[in-house]
């Protein structure tokens, strides 16, 4: 019990406090290449488009993108405390797991890592939005089903916001992918943003509201 209390204290001390009431709040996007605008201009990525939409619609939030191409859930778990300490976000959009799936990594390990990231963010006072992902059918029915279900299970466990499939409306359109057939084109980014926005919008507060 004492060790658990001490750990929570150290995390709280390292992360500091969230922005005071009335200050601009921050959204931290914590993902992989699908959120890092791989292969396209940063300004065309869905994260940059999110910042533009927030401003246009009167939401007093800034957006920090801590996404890294090739990142796995393990890599994210190893750097989440540092990212939270640096950004002090009010909301964390967690969009990791795709690389775990593509590499066929153990799903229990992925869930543990994503759960650790989520719990750490929540202890820091941030609300979390989990973005789900799916695998191609060639990974086998059992693996693909359990992979997809992992994200909804985590969302229910930690009571987070939830995007069922980050690239819904894109995955079945080959013309919306770059030549590697893995990364969406610039033309696909507004659809990705719309997928995120549906779940993110209810979590936002307009300027001047409590």
Image: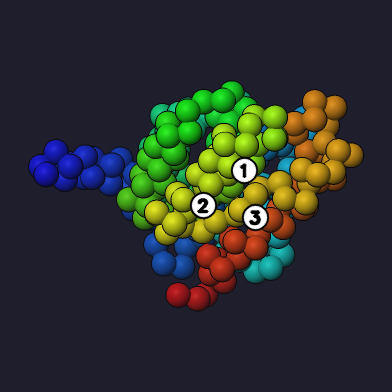
Q: Residue at x 72, y 65 (%)?
A: 56
Q: Residue at x 81, y 44 (%)?
A: 172
Dot 2 falls on a residue whose secondary structure is helix
Distance in Å between CA atoms under marks 1 and 2: 10 Å
Q: Are marks 2 and 3 in contact (CB under 8 Å)?
A: no
Q: Which of marks 3 and 2 precedes in the sequence?
A: 2
Q: Quadrant of the N terminus?
A: top left
Q: What is the x, y in percent for residue 141?
A: 62, 37
Q: Which mark is residue 152?
A: 2
Mark 1 crowdedness (10 Å alpha carbons): few <14, some 14-19, many ≥20: many
Query: Mark 1 sits on what residue?
Result: 133
Mark 2 crowdedness (10 Å alpha carbons): few <14, some 14-19, many ≥20: some
Q: Is residue 106 visible?
A: yes
Q: Residue at x 44, y 57 (%)?
A: 156
Dot 3 falls on a residue whose secondary structure is helix
Distance in Å between CA atoms under marks 1 and 3: 12 Å
Query: Mark 3 sits on what residue?
Result: 196
- Residue at the far left: name it: 2
Q: Nearer the viewer, mark 1 or mark 3?
A: 1
Work out whether 139 lies above or below 156: above
Residue 67, image quadrant:
top right
Distance in Å between CA atoms under marks 2 and 3: 15 Å
């Amino acid at each position: 019990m004492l060790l658990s209390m001490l750990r929570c204290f150290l995390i709280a001390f390292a992360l500091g406090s969230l922005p005071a009431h009335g200050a601009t709040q921050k959204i931290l996007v914590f993902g992989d290449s699908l959120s890092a605008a791989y292969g396209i201009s940063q300004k065309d990525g869905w994260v940059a488009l999110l910042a533009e939409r927030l401003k246009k619609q009167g939401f007093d939030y800034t957006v920090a993108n801590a996404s890294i191409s090739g990142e796995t859930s393990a890599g994210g778990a190893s750097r989440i405390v540092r990212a939270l300490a640096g950004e002090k976000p009010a909301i964390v959009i967690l969009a990791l797991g795709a690389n775990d799936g593509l590499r066929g990594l153990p799903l229990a390990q992925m869930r543990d890592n994503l759960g650790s990231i989520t719990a750490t963010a929540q202890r820091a006072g941030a609300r979390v939005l989990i973005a789900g992902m799916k695998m191609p059918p060639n990974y086998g029915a059992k693996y693909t089903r359990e992979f997809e279900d992992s994200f909804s299970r985590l969302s229910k466990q930690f009571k987070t916001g939830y995007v069922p499939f980050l690239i819904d409306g894109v995955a079945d359109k080959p013309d919306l992918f770059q030549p590697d057939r893995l990364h969406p084109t610039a033309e696909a980014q507004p659809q990705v943003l719309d997928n995120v926005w549906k779940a993110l919008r209810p979590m936002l507060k307009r300027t001047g509201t409590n």
